[in-house]
Image (cartoon, rainbow, N blue to C red):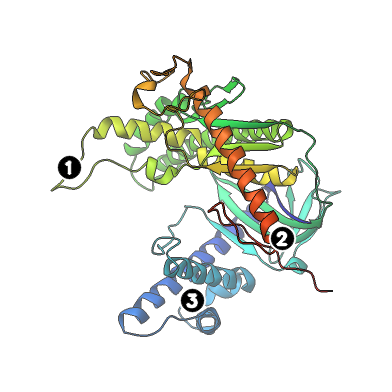
Amino acid sequence: MRRFQAFKFELKPTGEQQRDMRCFAGSCRYVYNKALALQQENYEAGGKFIGFFAMAKYLTEWRNGPATPWLKDSPIHPLQHALKDADWAYKKFFAKRAGFPRFKKKGLRDSFRYPAAKQVKLDQSNSRIFLPKLGWVRYRRSRDVVGDLKYATVSQRAGKWFVSILTEREVESPLPQATSAVGIDVGIARFATFSDGDYLEPLNSFRRHEARLRRAQRAMSRKKRLSHNWHKAKRRVQNIHAHIANARRDYLHKATTRISQNHAMVCIEDLRVQYMSKSAAGTVKAPGRNVRAKSGLNKSILDQGWYEFRRQLEYKQAWSGGWLIAVPPQNTSCTCPTCGHVFADNRPTQARFACVRCGYADHADVVGAINVLRRGLALFSSEGQDHARIACGEPAQSGHSVKQEPAEAA
């Protein structure tokens, strides 16, 4: 099987290289915004969508035109990839998989990509990487890069520059070392509760630094905008945000690695975090209720990183040969695992579960994890039966869609 893996390192550029990287990122941002503006003007005039190849001709005009001759100072491939990003953003919008594309802002996710592998050279023994029009740039080598290089992305965050190297390599189909299955119920009081009774305490990275962040933002608001002191205060705010994100990412990576190493099958709830953390403010005509309480709940939900937790589990289980099963989350915490009775009063408090029919009692999150595991095993069993029926030429009967692999040619 083919494995795609990204390796991210912090760059150590010279002052001149930092200036060039800021220029390259600004040029890519300009091309992206220019393409979006041109698409909007063309749409308002009643024209059709401008594809990538037609838009590339405009890029040639912009680089050779008298208004933007500085675009020639940037490598052409990152600029072309900026046009592809704009093209993908519009296609996702047309396919109703994303919102309407928005213009990029300076200083927010500044990045540029070298999409061709032959343009980038990696010298791991000397901890340096060659990037077109930048030359050899040193980086902090924390681990070895494995596989064939596909492309490199340079990005800035909190005043530091990073390079992300995507590689591809062939690996043998993995077999899970563990043999157990576990159900996981995520929450706020407990970050993750397992069906065997174990649980992980929440990190609450944002909550820990919220007061410090508030003071830094208040100090920044009192500085004259774009002054020297304002930029210093802004860097302090960015560093706090970066520290919060790094701590959360480190915690999630360690947790998901341990889970994937110890369990061949992981069952979790199919949560829609985007809708769970939606604001309750409402509108002027129809204002929401308990807005302040819902805002605090949303902040706690987003502080846990549930979506990133599931994303990491998904690819780590695939790398280890295991399975990740997402089950419907309805009534997982108010269903009795002994008698199957479903009733809201089975959960009198946030942490306590007591079945009103049979009297079974346990922690509510543990009960939810047990129900998640049972639903996952039932779903996995029914899909396995459907795969067997399809292999025999019979229709599936479980009601779940099963992907059928094409037969190999004789």
Q: Which of the two residues, 66 or 321, is positioned nearer the viewer here?
A: 321
Nearest-to-viewer mark from 2 and 3: 2
Callout 1 crowding tier (Cα within 10 Å): few <14, some 14–19, many ≥20:
few
Which of the numbered marks, if any, corresponds to residue 221? none
Contact? badges 1 and 3 (CB < 8 Å): no
Locate the C terminus and report the quarter of the image it occupies.
bottom right
Q: Which residue is mark 2?
A: 391
Question: Can you give x and y, in whole percent of width and height, for residue 32 in the image?
Answer: 48, 68
Callout 3 crowding tier (Cα within 10 Å): few <14, some 14–19, many ≥20:
few
Mark 2 vs mark 3: which is more N-terminal? 3
Q: Residue at x 55, y 43 (%)?
A: 326
Callout 2 crowding tier (Cα within 10 Å): few <14, some 14–19, many ≥20:
few
**Residue farthest toward the left in the current orientation of the protein:** 285
Q: Which residue is mark 3?
A: 68
Q: Is residue 129 left or right of residue 104?
A: right
Q: Is residue 385 left or right of residue 291?
A: right
Compared to residue 189, the image places residue 145 above or below, namely below
Q: Amino acid at mark 2?
A: Ala
Q: Amino acid at mark 1?
A: Pro
Which of the numbered marks, if any, corresponds to residue 287? 1
